[in-house]
Image (cartoon, grey):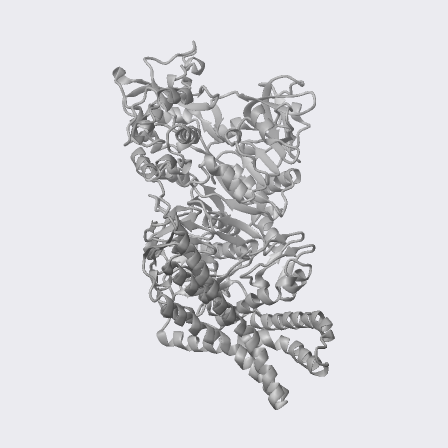
Amino acid sequence: DETLADLFRYSAQKYPLKTALIFGDTSVTYQQLDNWTDAIAADLAAKGIKEGDKVGIWHKRGLALHAAILGVVKAGAAYIPVDREIPAERVETIFTEVEASAYISEDLLNLSFPMFSVRPQPLAGEKITVPKTPSPDNLAYVLYTSGSTGKPKGIPIGHRQICHLVRSEQSVLEIRESDRIYQGFSVSFDMWCEETWVSYFAGATIWVADNTTSKAIDELSDVLNREKITVLHAVPSLLAVMDDDIPTLRLVNAGGEACTMQVLNRWSTKNRIFYNSYGPTETTVSATFAALKPGDAITIGDPLPNYNLAVVDENLNPLPLGERGELVISGPGVAQGYMKLPQLTQEKFVLKTASLADLPGDRIYRTGDAAMIREDGSIEFLGRFDDQIKLRGYRIELGEIEVKLAGLQDISAAAVAVKKDVAEQEQLVGYIVTVGSIQLEENLLRLELAKVLPSYMVPATIVQLAEMPRMPSGKVNRKALPVPESLLINTNTAAEETLDMNAPLPDRLLNILRKTFPNKTVNLSMDFFDDLGGHSLLAAGLVSRLRREGGVPKASLRDIYLHRPLQKLIEVWEQQTPVDQKPERKFHQIKLSRYYACWLAQTVALGFIYTVFAVQIFVPYLGYYYVEQDTGHLGYAIATALVMFALIPFLFSLVSIGTKWLVIGKFKEGDYPLWGSYYFRWWFAKTVQRLLTVQFLNGTPLYPVYLRLLGMKVAADAQLSNFITGAEDLISIGSDVSISSGVNLNNAVVEDGLLKLRSITIGDHAYIGTASVISGGVVMEPWTELQDLSYLQENTIVKSGEVWRGSPAILKETKKIEDLPQPLFVSASTRNKYKLLFSLSLIIFPFIILLPLLPTIIAINKLDNAAEDYDFTYMVLVPSLAVVYIVLFALETVVLSRLLQRNIKPGTYPVYSLFYYRKWFADQLMSISLIVLHPIYATVYVSAFFRALGAKIGKNTEISTASSVTHPLLKIGSGAFVADAVTLGESDIRGQQLILDYTE
């Protein structure tokens, strides 16, 4: 007696800080998702959705889709999931038939009931009325599959059934809390439930693929490796075309269609469990599992716990072992029937006969699948008895396609069959007879079908016949339908034989396409999918040939999905200069005399640089020494040392700014000889700048002021963390720009014997993610975004609203500017108040560094005074005094950090607020600790140090120099390893607001 809401809440309480969902660069923890979906449920209830209602889901992939479904479930309603790419007409038919009370989407449909949007995550402190737990007797969801009458048929699944499936399947798969699950299935496919509900129950992390990634087979291996996916649910046809190994993958569940020996031998290894699963939607996702090893016979295994199966004859009598019959299923997963299809329900969901008395329950489901029970008790799947098929995981009624095809103008008869191509891949083929034998355009027929059928149900090719082959009964003889010529041609061989590499790219593409789709008219105005009948496997083959022989080394499936029709593909690929066509690079010769002249100048300059660097070390101590000697007053001596140490950063900033303007003046865009006078002056100015530790200016309104003094054009309200730049005068940073830590504005490079200085422009409201690199010549227009760990190549222009990601970065998505949140308004007076506060705070940090050192300084001074001339035996105490300093500094850091970060919680906070100031101050303390306490990092002491700072750290954990840590919001499990220079859960700043979240 439980519901999906109960199962999820169980995990939310057990793993509150564990990441539940990841989509792109965003994620939510179980606690955040629990709060969000509570808010969605409360919102739905306020809008009239009550227990027992049905709510349609027609939403694009992402966190909001998952949250919407959970919210509907928590509200006590059943969700009706429909893939976002299914035609609107079919969606309207489904939602109307199921009598939905509302639907959740981004696009309005022609329906009489309301559309709702997914509300955003609740703000910190927002009060939410937790909805009442739904009844286990309620429906959980209604899944629609293809129907032989021409209309999809709905299968209602209750909470008892799906919850039983979750527990039953988890007892077999044993998904772990540490697992990362790839979520690639459409929401309208029932294996989505395995990816999602079973993973939620286990407390695992679900990595949600976006719409393009879920189709880009050629990129899937890279994605699985990059995201360290450990569990993959997939159809065998997808596994068959994935070549690269996935070392992190420990479990593969192949289901949705018949498995092959090639797939089994490829994916089952000694370090990876391979399951072949089987189950119709009518019995709640899966009913059997077989753990198979290479060379095993392909079976669908044994029933899940509490499921029962039998192989029967036409009278429902059990058949002996080894005999072929119909597979029937009983148990708590069997649905009640079909929505509003009583006759079909009566045919498929039947009362148990006396001969099946051993099966539990009073009803069985007739699958229509042929099977036999082997001697070892396992079940072998032998295909279908009727016209239903499974293709690439989707269950399809051929009759439904035939009804739609026959309904098109000028068609007198239609049939649909599955035929294998030369590569043994199954393809959906349509056959038609026309009125008066008139010739119809195949691509136009496909376009008409695409208006009323999902893409996976549109035939790859449509063949026009003079007449249909029929059996004596008058029924179409599908076995006699001819295999289209296009499926019998080896497109790889044909393309290689005729491809002219000297031909223009459009001609090369058309050449390959005509071999891929023989007997079809192909032109660049066509769409690969809608007009030509392509699908993901054909697209993967096309991409492979283009990379291999077509002169397009960067071709990808993503391109084919994103750039439609074919002409747009050409435009994209023509911009990618082939490797062999790149212009030759000319090296600028360097005179030996110039090299030695620069060497001599740098040697002299280093003397000045080291002298300046030594000042910050010796001056405070010398001040202490001489004042103490002259006055004999310890307090005066300490005060002198502290004041001198506090003034050094300010004096260094003046030296840095003055040196830049005296030595080089204003940087100018251009190319300058390596080791020349301009290069030397550039090197000298930048080296002196590096002497100043600007980390205390990061994230403050003082940083833009300092950069403007160096010549950079930067708005006063820009939010800047630490970043590197080569030539300040050539950089322009607009209003409300946010630059995260570790960014490199790389506008000064040495290349081909030249120092090249280039401009970089970052427009208003732009965002640059952590550890990203931007090359010279880049222009980021207003309202643009470069995500974490990305690299923008030189001269790239990022248009307004665009989001780029990757290395090299590519366009990920384009957002509507009017939909983007506006930044908080901050008055000049408010900024000035906080400038004063931050300025005063800068004086404090030298004191924080020096105070724990005072006992050591005093002790050494006392020991030195007490020692005789040239007696330095007291130096043996220096290691002990160093330990005293380390301990005192660590204690000081812990106390101050805990005070500053007390009651810190995830949420959104204004940048100009005392909360932000406290967080900034604590961050500076940790930056100092990375320097002062550097020797203890990567030792056993760091875990204890992090725990003292408020982090939850498991046993046997090794942590090195992690930065940007918000310790009270950090959780690290047992046995984890955090390497050097890791940015660990950096807080985000957007629109003049600080965004905090848990890091687990």
Residue 786 shows in this picture: no
Q: Nearer the viewer, residue 37 or 870?
A: 870
Q: Is residue 600 above or below residue 474?
A: below
View extreme (top): residue: 472
Q: Is residue 469 above or below residue 515?
A: above
Q: Quadrant of the C terminus?
A: bottom right
Q: Residue at x 67, y 27 (%)?
A: 357
Q: Nearer the viewer, residue 899 or 204?
A: 899
Q: Residue at x 43, y 26 (%)?
A: 148
Q: Within the image, what quadrant is residue 835 found in?
A: bottom left
Estimate the x, y position of residue 396 in percent, counting from the top left.
Answer: 46, 28
Q: Within the image, what quadrant is residue 827 found in?
A: bottom left
Q: Is residue 827 above or below residue 361?
A: below
Q: Is residue 778 left or right of residue 144?
A: left
Estimate the x, y position of residue 982 in percent, counting from the top left.
Answer: 55, 55
> How many circles with numbers are drawn on the protein?
0
Q: Is residue 274 above or below residue 60?
A: above
Residue 707 shows in this picture: yes
Estimate the x, y position of residue 954 in percent, counting from the top left.
Answer: 67, 56
Estimate the x, y position of residue 205 in percent, counting from the top left.
Answer: 57, 48
Q: Nearer the viewer, residue 710 or 196?
A: 710
